[in-house]
Amino acid sequence: MLAAAVTEHLFWISSRAAGTAALLLSSLAVCVGLLFGGKLVKGRPDLRHLHEALSLATIVALVVHAVSLLGDSFLHPSLADITVPFVSGYMRLWTTVGIVAGWAMIALGLSYYVRDRIGQQRWKKLHRFTALAWLAGLAHSFGEGTDAGTTWFVVASAMVVVPAFVLLIVRHVGPSSPQPARQAKPARPVAPARHEVQARDEPQARHEPQTRHEPQTRPVAHARPARQEIVR
Amino acid sequence: MLSEHGPTVLSMSEPTPSEPPRADRPGSEPTLSPKQLAQAKLRARAARIGRMRKRVIAASLATFVLAFGAIAVDGPMGATSSATSQTSASVASGNSTSSSENQTNSSDDQTTSSDDSSSSDSGSSSSSNSGSSSSSNGSGSSSPSTVTTSQS
């Protein structure tokens, strides 16, 4: 009887199982990412690879979650229903939230491999939106998920979602350490121009003696003390 | 991809001034050159990362299989179907209980009427009536027959 039910609803059950796996794996990936990204765990360089592996596994589970729905004989969605927001008529809001979250997770996860083109700082800012995508996926799971009311799903989700929530709160509420390090970076090439403007406005506030004649085209290294003076 | 951020062989093979050359020690165990040492470290790191990836894949598959099993046991409609089936089951059992109670009452009435006709032990039949009315399940329906049997 069980085998007959599983055979009849194979795609439907597979989609739900893949969605559950995607939720658990993405929560674990968020946990690991927040652990090593927030400098909460030091001396473990393998965490980055663990985060990467968990993210790739999440993407695979998301694809299985969506594609296996295509084979469901009862819901029978089209390709547009599972990929384009606001197309599906089945619980349109939660389905749209899930589609947007899925696309965001896939795009933000795979953007890691083109971060050199995007730029490291810009990619880091972009990568923070992964937490939003994870939250949207969580809302989709509990808003639309067929198993959202079952005990095993709630317990399994709580085991990984609660730590991720706590780490997310710690990361955003706690002191942010990367800010001072960003200010301590060497000056940009525009620094000499600002320094020259500062020198023209305040000729008495120089470290160098007034009698020293400086060249018009000043090297960048010479402009650093003035840059720090401006920051201070 | 993996070796982008890790120490390269070239950077690791550069001899540092603090390390004396190990080849000069004749009594020690056979040592590796810095290049071989770096390659061994890289190999160990790659093997460690490979093991970790295999574990993640295994954990993902295990999660999928466990979730599949739990869903298959729960039923294809999940919590909704189980709640609905429980509700329908309880409604059905409630109907059957009420019908059995009705039957019990009717049989009790019949028993009472027969008791009235025989005009003996009416007290015992009324006590059996109260007992059957207090028990809401179907087990109370056996008491009238018992009474009937004792009366007969």
Image: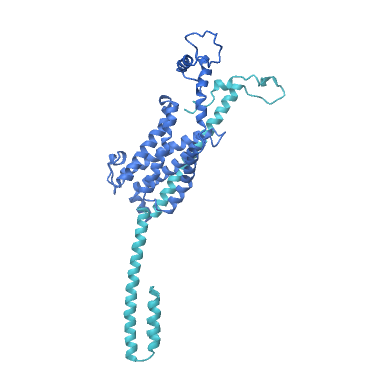
Chain colours: A blue, B cyan
Q: Residue furthest bottom?
A: B119
Seen in the picture, residue B113 relative to A41 is either above or below; the reply is: below
Which x, y percent locates residue A25? 45, 41
Residue B35 relative to residue B145: left or right? right
Q: Residue at x 46, y 34 (%)?
A: A52
B29 relative position to A11: left or right: right
Q: Quadrant of the C terminus of chain B?
A: bottom left
Q: Quadrant of residue B136?
A: bottom left
A110 relative to A1, above or below: above
Looking at the picture, how far across and down is residue B22, in whole percent?
67, 21
Residue at (40% x, 26% y) in the render: A118
Q: Nearer the viewer, residue A181 or A14?
A: A181
Rendered position, B138 above or below B48: below
Residue B145 visible, this angle: no
Residue A102 % position (x, y): 37, 39
Horizontal and vertical percent for residue A134? 41, 40
Q: In this rendering, would B66 be left or right of A12? A: right
Question: At 42% from the left edge and 28% from the top edge, which residue is drawn?
Answer: A122
At 32% from the left edge and 87% from the top edge, which residue is drawn? B114
Q: How many marks?
A: 0
| Residue B74 in view | yes
